[in-house]
Each structure stands twice: as C-alpha cells, then as structure tokens.
Image (spheres, rainbow, N blue to C red):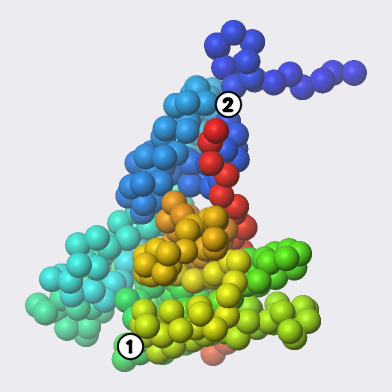
Amino acid sequence: MRTKQPTKSGHGNEPRKTLQDVARVAGVHYTTVSRSLRGDPQIAAKTRERVRKIAAKMGYEPDPMLQALARYRMREHTDSFHGTLAWLINIPKESDTYKKTRRADFNTANEWASHKGYRFETFNLADPDLTPERIFKIMASRGIRGILLPPQRKPETRLDLDFSGFSVVTIGNTLETPDLHRVSPAQFDNAHLLSKHLLETPGLRVGLYLPGLIDRRTNGRISAAFWRAQQDIPPEKRIPIHLPEDYDEADFRAWMTRHPMDVLIATPQPSIEWLGRMNLRIPEDIRVASPTGNIEKETSFWIEEEWDEIYRSAVDFLISQIERNLTGEPDTPRRITIRGTLMTRREIS
C-alpha cells in the first residue's frame, strides 16, 4: 500500500512548511497568511509584518510547483471577453474613506470577473460632476448590463435609484433600500459561533459591548446572536448586553465596573485603549474578542470573515443574473451568506 510522503522543503529532510502551518502558529486563517505575504493592503500593516516574520522564522517558502499550477489554471480558465460590469460606489472623493477605499476588494472582484470574461469599471454616485441619471445613461450606452454595489459607508442607507434594465447585486447589509440580491458575511452565524464558544467555556464570564451604530450596521445580528447563545447558560451567569447609542468611555467604565468579566466581546478599538486606562491588563486580567475580522494584536478570539470568497460569490451571482436576463429590483430578493472561521490567538514561541 502506498503512503503519501510529506513534501520536502529543500532544507535537509524537513517537510515543507505550508500556509496552514504558518496560520496555526500565527493564529490567523490561512487566507490571511497568503494575503499578508502578498502585501494585501486590506490586511492591517501590523498583521502583515507579524505574519512575514513568523513565516521567515519557520522557513516557509512558496511551493514552486503549486505556483506554476496556479498560473496554468489562470490561463486555462480565462474566457473570452464578454463585457464590462459596473462597480458602483457612493463615496465623496474628499473623504478619507475614498482615499483608502477597499481597493483590495475591487481587485479581488475584478480578478475573479476576468476569469469569467468580464472586467469592472468604477462609477461614483457621489461624483459632483455626474448625476445618478447621467451615470446610468453612460452605463447603458457602453453596453454594461451588470452592477455590483460594495458595502455602503453608513448603515440603513437608502438609494433612490432605478435599476431597470440592469442585473444588480449588493454586498453586505448596509443598503436598506432598494431591497436587492445580496452576498454578505453570515453575521448571525459568525457571532453565535464566537459567543457560544466563549459562553460555554467553564469559568468564563463573558460580556458584549457594542454601540448602536455598529449593531445597526449588521441589522442587530451580533447582539441577537449573543442573546441567543446566553439562553443556553444559567440566568445568574448572564451579563446584560450593553448597546449604548455611541462610544462613551465613562459609560463603558460604569458598565464594566458593575459587571466584572473574563472576556469582553467588542470592537477592539477603542475598547482596548479604555481597558488600559482602567489598569486592566490584556490578556492577563481580561481578554478581548471581536465578532468581525477587525482585530488588533491584543485580540484573543475573533471571526475571520472570508471577504475574498464573499466578493467572488457576488461576482458569480451577478453573472448568473446577467445570463438569465434577470434585471431590476427583484420581486424575491435572494441572500447568500458566507460563514467565517473562529480564530484563537497563538503567538510564536
């Protein structure tokens, strides 16, 4: 019987280190390792640098055969050109958000679209030189049939737009109206996975602090998931969920004083800074958990949201609508949600 031999790295007889090996040591998802090593600007600079150092210390080297296979597959699966798709944003050019907009997300979507024979062109609804009506006329004149809307800057956004004649998909849950087909992180499932893991760990007291602005951005999915997970533990062990309207350090201190805990589920900043001013050491006195992929080096638990897969799925969904000639605001909006991965911090020794 044949047995599979470990791949050699070329350094003696040691097995080749893989992305998964680096990810386990770094305490991140393997896609985060891959994107960090590629210099993806969507990954925090501190994370990219930490992952690079860990990979170097472990002696990680890309597998040249896998790289060659990836290049071959890219060539083989690139179809002939079918047309242009619209990447429709709504960001004033003078804003910081525009300057550091999620270029990596555009690149992911555009690269995936190119495999299907399409490319994206950006249109900005906030462009003072163009009205939305003018933008739509330009798209129609260029034969653009599909529109992808990335997440809006603010929750509960309403856009008074007529999508007649276009297939359209939006990403995330920040666009309230019109009600379109959408692809998003599985925010309830993700937050429930994190909450249940922590709440069912013996001896851990767990609290959730989330400003209303952030909670509304997910349509209450994070707070609802935490509340549901709390129902499976005794009432006396439940710490009341705290959802202030906005970030308020004095209010945060008062809540933390009333409810001592071992793990705080919150957006890492400014919570980490506030905990430091309360003389609470992380992770010795308290650990911090993030229900989204926004993490800092002090974060002990978090959900790695699969944004690359979200954007690829959105492109596939949009192209399927074009191929079926389904246009305009749908009578029955469909939802595709992509579940993330629960991550736990493990530092390299």
How far apart are the two marked residues, 2 and 1, measured between alpha carbons? 48 Å
**Residue lying at 30% horizontally and 56% vertically, measured from the top left:** 103
Between 295 and 118, the one nearer to me in the picture: 295
Q: Is residue 123 left or right of residue 304?
A: left
Callout 1 environment at 10 Å: few (<14), some (14 to 19), or many (20+)?
few
Could you tell me if residue 25 is visible in this image? yes
Could you tell me if residue 135 is visible in this image? no
Between 89 and 295, the one nearer to me in the picture: 295
Name of the residue lying farthest toward the top? 12
Q: Is residue 347 left or right of residue 245?
A: right
Residue 166 image-quadrant placement = bottom left
Asked if residue 331 is positioned above or below residue 13 in the image, the reply reads below
Asked if residue 10 is positioned above or below residue 268 in the image, the reply reads above
Element on which disc 1 rests = loop
Between 201 and 47, the one nearer to me in the picture: 201
> Which mark, residue 17?
2
Asked if residue 94 is positioned above or below residue 41 in the image, the reply reads below
**Residue lying at 60% horizontally and 40% vertically, measured from the top left:** 24
Q: Amino acid at mark 1?
A: Leu
- The residue where tag 1 is placed is 159
Q: Position of residue 34 (x, y in %)?
A: 47, 40
Q: Quadrant of the N terminus?
A: top right
Name of the residue lying farthest toward the right? 1
Q: Position of residue 33 (x, y in %)?
A: 48, 41
Q: Position of residue 225 (x, y in %)?
A: 63, 78
Q: Nearer the viewer, mark 2 or mark 1?
A: 2
